Image: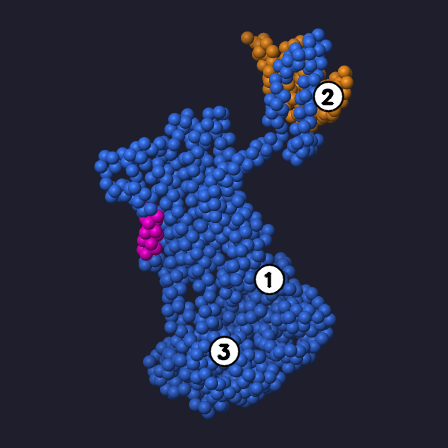
Amino acid sequence: MSTSESTTLLQGTLDLLILKSLATGEMHGLGVSRRIEQITGGTFVVKPGSLFPALHRMEEEGWISSFWGESENNRRAKYYRLTKPGRRQLETETKRWSRISVAIARVLEAS
Amino acid sequence: MPLFAKGRSLLRNLLSRRRVDADLDREVRAHLDLLIDENLRAGMGRAQAERAARLELGGVEQVKEQVRDHRLGNWLQSVFGDVRYALRQLRKNPGFTTVAILTLALGIGANTAIFSVVDGVLLRSLPYRDPGRLVMVWERNSVVGNPYNTVSPPNFLDWQVRNSVFSGMAYVCDVRNNLTGQGEPEEVVVQAVSANFFSVIGVEPILGAGFTPENGTKGHDDVVVLSFSLWQRRFAGDPKIIGKSILLNGKPQTVVGVAPENYAWLVKDGSLTGGKPQIWTPFVFPPAYAVHKDMGRFISVVARLKPDVTLAAARSQMKSIATQLEIEYPNANRHWGVNVVPMAEQVSGSLKPALLVLFGAVLFVLLIACANLSGLLLARAGGREREIAVRTAIGASSWRITRQLLVESMVLAILGGVAGGALAIWGTNALLAATPSNLLELRAVRVNVRVLLFSTLCTLTAGLLFGFVPSYFTAWSRSAQRLREAGRGTSAAVRSVAARNVFVIGQLSLALVLLVGSGLLVRSFLRLVAVEPGFQVKNLLTFKVTLPDARYSTDSARVQLFQQLLAKIAAIPGVSSVSMESFPPLTGLGAATDVHVLSQPAGPHGELPGANVRVVGSDYLRTMGIPLRAGRFFTPQELQEEKHVTIVNHAFVDKYLNGTQPLGQKLAIYMKSLTESELTPSEVIGVVGDVHQMGLDATPDPTVYWPHPELVMSQMTVLVRTSSDPIPMVPAIRDELHQLDTELPMASVATMEQLLGDSLARSRFTMLLLGVFAGFALLLAAIGIYGLIAYSVTQRTQELGVRMALGAQMEDILRLVLAQGARLIVAGAVLGTVAAAGLSQLMKSLLFAVQPLDPFTLSAVPLFLSLIAFAACYVPARRATKVDPMVALRYE
């Protein structure tokens, strides 16, 4: 898992980011990667060496499915989209994340 | 459905690996192209765009490898990798591999073969409906002690009426009949049964309807059910056999059924026929059987427990019924109780101890084989220290290395298991071929699913057993140390030698236990063979002749035919004498009854002396070679008609006559009746030597001999003493028989030597088998200690070289190395002797005239084992003395 500006992703965060980016619609690997860069304002840069193992693992889990399609400039690329279990997973992950971030925020405020 | 998705992915990853890989390759390359496009759009030049894209991607192959690492089933694939690696390793060491696989194959093969017999004999399901509910019901005499005595018909009838625990009771009586018409006359084993017999045991004929209840009444009982093999052999499997008529003892009988092929009925040990039944026919009790309470005991009884009745409940009710019957009919039933035995126990009972001992023995052999392999693997691990060290240094975890080593031993175990399976199939067949035919009904023994499961379990357990310790020592000793120490005999190596020492001691002691067991059996067998049978065994031919009642209905006709037969055979050149006897010797067959010595006070039945009764013909003593101790043999007149005379044996005089003169004593022998007033007492006219009539392992019982006319039997065993090998004379003898009556078969032809051999067969078989296993165990243990000493000599080459350079003599070196072996041998011998002393108690029932703690065996066997093991140490010790100090010092 590589990040820029030495921001280390918490365990399980990459999954959440990928699920969230796919929630807006199907896209290929590069699209997912660019989308994450975009929404995190460049905080997280997901390199292919982390991205592809995650995508394949999530596909094996049944959260996303893949198909071959045409890219905007007519190149064949592998596209991913969320499945029903994937949406459920996104919901649980989101809730979990909110709980954690609230908890951590409290810890930080307390000091 | 995440689980479903996972399963599908796993299958896809494993099965269409190449397609998945190609897909991944295309995906990553497409990604690269997209990156290049992006860079081009950002205004880079072609070359720069490609370079930047590659930089961002970080290498197509690396990305693919990372995906593969995370893939489902990756673990399994890396195990496959380990397996391939293990196979390569094994191929590179053909010597080690061959020894290891052979050792395992023998261990697993022997276990599987013995287990298949155990399975067939102890675990198999009997070919009857719900066999767990079937019991045999015997009478048991509290004085004589035979727990499986056949039953008297009146008692059976009373049991049937009074019990409420059985849903059905049936009886069986073994007889031999002559089957004539259509081809050669032959004698067949017939079971005369109650009409409900087949319905009680739950066997349906494959052809015909079988017996109906009506067949159980007089006048409707001339029907038969044929065995499958008889139907095939004699009637060529005729599908229209039902309703046809066959001639049994000259009487026509209608065939009403053919029994299934796998069906067999227990033939009681020592039953009068001792063969597989070929025909079943209804046996209708005459009305007198219900009235007279004082008749013989000759039927076997089988019963089916009611569904809700336990064995204990049945036993207790039958016991109280037997007690009532003993009180109501003291004359017939004094001291007679009842014994209810589950069918399965009845079938396997006598074999169980031998089988369990053999089964224990092969388990020991497998354990020894595992210890041996563990030792070999540990030694080999010594040579692989560097390889393991390098793997650890470049990041393999200890678990990973343990796994790889365990996979290696599992691969070995599975190869050994497969070879062992093949060996077991061959071994089981060899076992069946070598098994004496009277040992057991082995048709049910074959390699089946249970046996294969057992074999697989053996294999996997063995792999774990022998792989665990070596992989533990190899993988978990500190790796940094190992890089420095590799190849030198230091701490890790020292610890693994300690483990190997333990293995060698274990092997030696296990082998010792087996050797002691086998030694005890050999001793026991030698004692058995050394027993003097009491008659001359060599050149004596025996065969049975049975006269059908239909044509030989009077006693005088029977006496006359046998007399003529003996006279005709005596005239054949080469026959030195001929006689006959009611039961063949050494087959465990005989009849026994109460005897009242008239000079002694009378007593109730059951408290009178008991004696075997044997009926004999002319020239009996000379033919058998039994010495006459006092008095005389029967005269020709006494052999022609009833003169009320008898001869007793030495045991009878010893046990019952208390030093009084035996000749002239009058005996009431309760054979023809149990009421003394109906008996004419017999006068003792002679005393003869004791004969082990029932078998070598049975002490000679008190016996009374009667001439044939005193108790005319329609079946006799003819004894022919010849001047040379009797077998070539069989055709001449058969001709004489057929001149008298063409329809009389010459049955159960055997020399006395064969009968003697058969009577020893079971002991010999167990002894040989255990001997083979013990020998194998000894060989493995010897290899084990040899391997260890040889290894440690190699490890100590440098040290030995230094010692020699400093002036140690050959003898010093020899002593040094041998002392190491001697310590192990002594430890193994002591441990093994203690274990053997404990375990040999389990063999008690297999031993004849030898105690389990036989001092000779317990001292000679450890000595023998020590000598062999010491010799195994001597070879590498010799080699150590040949070490050239200069070479040794440079060694490393």
Q: Is the magenta stretch mostly helix, strand or loop?
A: helix
Foreground disc of the pair 1, 3: 3
What residue is drawn where x is 61% and y is 19%? B59
Q: Give the Cα separation between the discs numbered 1 and 2.
A: 74 Å
Circles 1 and 2, Cβ within 8 Å, touching? The answer is no
Q: What element carries label 1?
A: strand
Circles 1 and 3, Cβ within 8 Å, touching? The answer is no
In this orientation, which residue lies closer to the viewer: B201 or B119? B119
Q: Give the range drawn in magenta.
A: B859-873
Determine which quarter of the picture holds residue A8.
top right
Percent coordinates x, y for residue A85 in the rendering: 71, 26
Reply above or below: B68 against B220: above
Asked if badges 1 and 3 are on one and the same chain, I answer: yes
Foreground disc of the pair 1, 2: 2
Chain ID at mark 3: B
Determine which quarter of the picture holds residue B815.
top left
Asked if badges 3 and 2 are on one and the same chain, I answer: no
* Residue beneath disc 1: B134
In this orientation, which residue lies closer to the viewer: B798 or B422? B798
Q: Give the Cα separation between the discs numbered 1 and 3.
A: 47 Å
Task: Say whether residue B275 is left or right of residue B618.
Answer: right
Task: Say whether residue B14 is left or right of residue B644.
Answer: right
Q: Who's blue, chain-wise?
A: B
Percent coordinates x, y for residue B53 in the rendering: 65, 14
* Residue beneath disc 3: B728
What residue is drawn where x is 65% and y is 10%? B48
Q: What residue type is labelled 1?
A: Leu
